Amino acid sequence: MNFLKTLFWVVVAVSLAIFANRNWADVTINLWGNIQADVKLPVLIMLTFLIGFLPPFLILRGRIWALKRKLVLAERPALPASAPNIPSKEEVTA
């Protein structure tokens, strides 16, 4: 199974490398005013992917972290309630 996982990531990496090589062209982005930026197309695609992917990913990781904390707290053994200290008959008569 680990071999298939590695093979999958190798295929994805090679595909991305071929895509980036074939599309390595400048794209002009019009910013505010008369400012323009020339960016390579694969860099622009990766940037837009990260802008869309990172916020939901971070929210998901935060929720998983909070749920794991709650689970650890719920799995802790409860501390036994201490019984009230009632004096015995011997202690009362003495």
Image (spheres, rainbow, N blue to C red):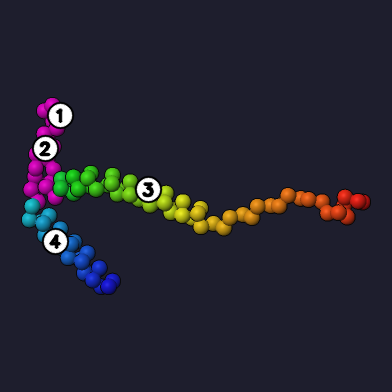
Q: Which residue is mark 1?
A: 32
Magenta region, residue range = 24-42
Q: Amino acid at mark 3?
A: Gly
- The residue positioned 82% from the left and 51% from the top of the image is 87
Spot occupied by residue 17 in the image (x, y as percentages of width and height): 14, 59
The disc, 1 or 3, on the residue closer to the chain's N-terminal end is 1
- Label 3, label 2: how many angstroms apart (C-alpha)? 34 Å
Spot occupied by residue 27 in the image (x, y as percentages of width and height): 9, 42
- Label 4, label 2: how many angstroms apart (C-alpha)? 26 Å
Neighbourhood count class around disc 3 (C-alpha, 10 Å): few under 14, some 14–19, many 20 upward: few
For the residue labelled by badge 1, is the local secondary structure a helix, a strand or a loop? loop
**Which of the two residues, 63 or 41, is positioned nearer the viewer here?**
63
- Label 3, label 4: how many angstroms apart (C-alpha)? 31 Å
Q: Which residue is mark 3?
A: 62
Residue 15, numbered circle = 4
Q: Which residue is mark 2?
A: 29
Query: Are dots 2 and 1 in contact, CB under 8 Å?
Result: no
Spot occupied by residue 30 in the image (x, y as percentages of width and height): 11, 34
For the residue labelled by badge 4, is the local secondary structure a helix, a strand or a loop? helix
Closer to the eye: label 3 or 2: 3
Name the image quarter holding residue 16.
bottom left
- The residue positioned 21% from the left and 69% from the top of the image is 7
